[in-house]
Amino acid sequence: MKTEIVAVGTELLLGQIVDTNSSWMGEQLALAGIDSHYQTKVGDNWDRIEDAFRLALDRSDAVIVCGGLGPTQDDITREVLASVMGVELVLDERIAERIRSMFASRSRSMPENNLRQAMVPVGASPIPQQPGTAPGLVAPIRWVQGFGAVAPDAEPPEGAAVVDRVVYVVPGVPYEMREMMNGTVLGDLQRRAGVSATIESRVLRTWGQSESGLAEMLAGRIDELDEAGNPTLAFLASGIEGIKVRITAKGADSAEAWRLIEAEQAVLEPLLGDLVFAYDDDNMEAAVLAELGRLGLTLGVAETITGGRMANRLSSAEAATRAGRAPGGAKLGDPGLASAADTGQSDGGTGPRTFAGGIVARSEHLMEYLLHAGSSTVSPMGDDLVPPLASAAGAEALARAARLRTGASVGLAVTAIEDRDAATPEHPFGTAFLAVSISAQPVRGDIPAVAHRDKADEIRLPGDRERLADYSAISALNLLRLTLTGRR
């Protein structure tokens, strides 16, 4: 079975919204064992949407249409689909009542134009999952290539070959789309395609090596897997989230597929070593918080170039973990993710916090305050000497200040040469200084002792200031991860 994705929305063509929906759906189709050969984007124009639908139905067995299900005049996906099917739109009172109930639950009256969302082409059925006001649709169609839809009770043109097609329509809101895809669309596609095998995957998330470098490291293993055919490996460069190495396996059932994945993971991890920091939907900050939790430590951060990026990532990850969810949305306990017990974080939000807080230091004045306010032990150069903000000594001083000023047991700091006028041949633009300061901790029950450590690192990063800030934040978190695990 060949499936095609059509994304509807002028904003996609103008670049106002990045079409992450199509890429996510394409990945899920591949994991479900469904072939997907085409992805199309089309603006909110009746004729162009109709042309896209007809072309897709001519060449693909199933079409997933994403977007254009809102209540406004430019949301015309329903109307165009009904036209292509050659049927009327009728009001589905159950959907209308569900939409009214959604507005009532928010103490709001429903605008009449929302009833447009309850209009359904004759012969189509609503997708049961409806987290928002836009219902999804499943529309079976009898189709003649180059001609169009044939009504269920009509005769096709003489000599024409009639084929069964199906159109799935889902909203453009990502979480609504994903709920419908996981709840109805993928399973229905597998049933129609007769897919009996189960395909599962696990992602090893790495930091510190390029995609080509990883491919070179794993070249021998990739050749062996290419010959065997199952499981398979794929690389996905993900910017500041690192390089993902995805293991995909096919089995008669989920348990068999996972046995193959776990066996392959056991082969890959020794080859990748310290590069692997997390799995699947987990991320660097969640991995750091889990290790801090294991050691019974708390963390405070001080940032200059990163402008609060580390604090934002850490607080978001901690909030997700305390709510029992991984940062990417998967529930803790899913394969490949640290469990709530492992992290010591998920307690309904009532337990102690691992992340104490952060300080954004953007001036020498604030630097002096952090180093001098009440303690001469902060600065490694002494109370009367404040190191330059953008230097290894400055980063180390800030890390110690982050630890002491936030009351945490670990301090993490980032500074950088972010002004091209301040760059030198020894420290060009893009030089970042990372530092960790850990206070000594005695043995506490089952928690091991932690030795005092102060460590600063100097790295060179590419790109403009925004890339410098993003990569500095993730690099600092990775330095802390490696330090906590005794690898640095």
Image (spheres, rainbow, N blue to C red):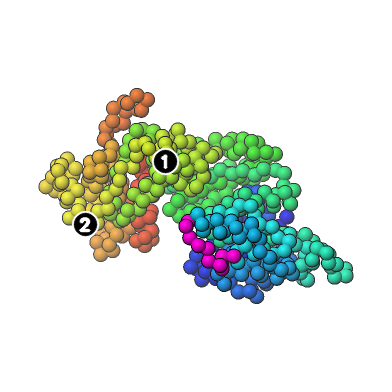
Q: Which residue is mark 2?
A: 363
Query: Mark 2, residues whose alpha carbon is within 10 Å: few (<14), some, or many (≥20)?
Result: few
Does the magenta segment cover residue 411?
A: no
Q: Is residue 63 visible?
A: no
Does the magenta segment cover residue 110?
A: yes
Percent x, y for residue 155? Answer: 85, 67
Magenta segment boundaries in residue numbering = 106-115
On screen, residue 110 versus residue 472, left or right, reads: right
Please name whichever residue, 97 or 191, is drawn nearer the observer in this view of the structure. Answer: 97
In the current view of this chain or complex, which residue is farthest to the right? 158
In the image, what residue occupies the spot 59% across and 46% down?
A: 233
Mark 2 or 1: in front is: 1
Percent x, y for residue 220? Answer: 57, 43
Report the number of discs.
2
Reading the chain from its start, which is encountered first: label 2 or label 1? 1
Q: Which residue is mark 1?
A: 322
Percent x, y for residue 219? Answer: 56, 45
- Specify the amino acid type for callout 1: Arg
Query: Mark 1, residues whose alpha carbon is within 10 Å: few (<14), some, or many (≥20)?
Result: many
Q: Is residue 133 above or below residue 262?
A: below
Callout 1: SS = helix
Please name whichever residue, 101 or 2, is drawn nearer the observer in this view of the structure. Answer: 101
